[in-house]
Amino acid sequence: MKNTTEIRQERLGKDVVDTRGIAEGAGQAGIGIIVLLAALIGVWGLACLVGGVMATGVGDLVRGFFSAVIGV
């Protein structure tokens, strides 16, 4: 059994699977997903801001913002 394992390692090589490459690819995919979600959240926030300006006007939007921050 030991001899069989050694033969298999000789044929395949000990570094058949590059774990660094897999980890790097997974990290890049994760960062890509995070960037995509951040962009979607930014677009959603901008759409809400434009909708608020269209519905109430700039003055009421600023007045409402300061009222929410100050608590009055």
Image: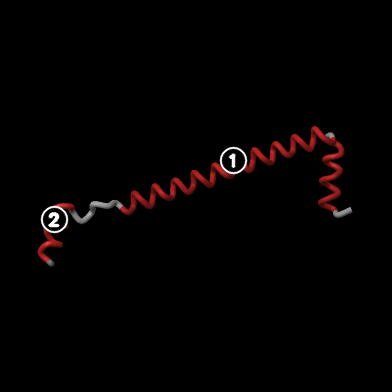
Q: CA distance from mark 1 to mark 2?
A: 48 Å
Q: Which mark is residue 30?
A: none
Quadrant of the drawing holding the N terminus: bottom left
Q: Is residue 57 left or right of residue 32?
A: right
Q: Amino acid at mark 1?
A: Ala
Q: Nearer the viewer, residue 52 or 65?
A: 52
In the rendered image, the residue lying farthest to the top is 54
Q: Which residue is drawn at the image coordinates 14% and 52% (left, top)?
A: 11
Q: Which residue is drawn at the image coordinates 86% and 43% (left, top)?
A: 63
Q: Are marks 1 and 2 in contact (CB under 8 Å)?
A: no
Classify mark 2: residues with Cα within 10 Å, few (<14), some (14-19) or many (20+). few
Q: Residue 9 falls in which quadrant of the image?
A: bottom left
In the rendered image, the residue lying farthest to the left is 3
Identify the mark nearer the N-term, 1 or 2.
Answer: 2
Helix, strand or loop for disc 2: helix
Q: Position of residue 19 (x, y in %)?
A: 32, 54
Q: Which residue is mark 2?
A: 10
Q: Residue 56 falls in which quadrant of the image?
A: top right
Q: Position of residue 30 (x, y in %)?
A: 47, 49
Q: Which residue is mark 1?
A: 39
In the rendered image, the residue lying farthest to the right is 72
Classify mark 1: residues with Cα within 10 Å, few (<14), some (14-19) or many (20+). few
Looking at the rendered structure, the number of numbered marks drawn on it comes to 2
Q: Is residue 23 above or below residue 56?
A: below
Q: Which residue is drawn at the image coordinates 83% and 40% (left, top)?
A: 61
Q: Position of residue 52 (x, y in %)?
A: 79, 38
Q: Is residue 61 left or right of residue 13?
A: right
Q: Amino acid at mark 2?
A: Glu
Q: Is residue 42 left or right of residue 2?
A: right
Q: Position of residue 48 (x, y in %)?
A: 73, 39
Helix, strand or loop for disc 1: helix
Q: Which residue is drawn at the image coordinates 86% and 49% (left, top)?
A: 67
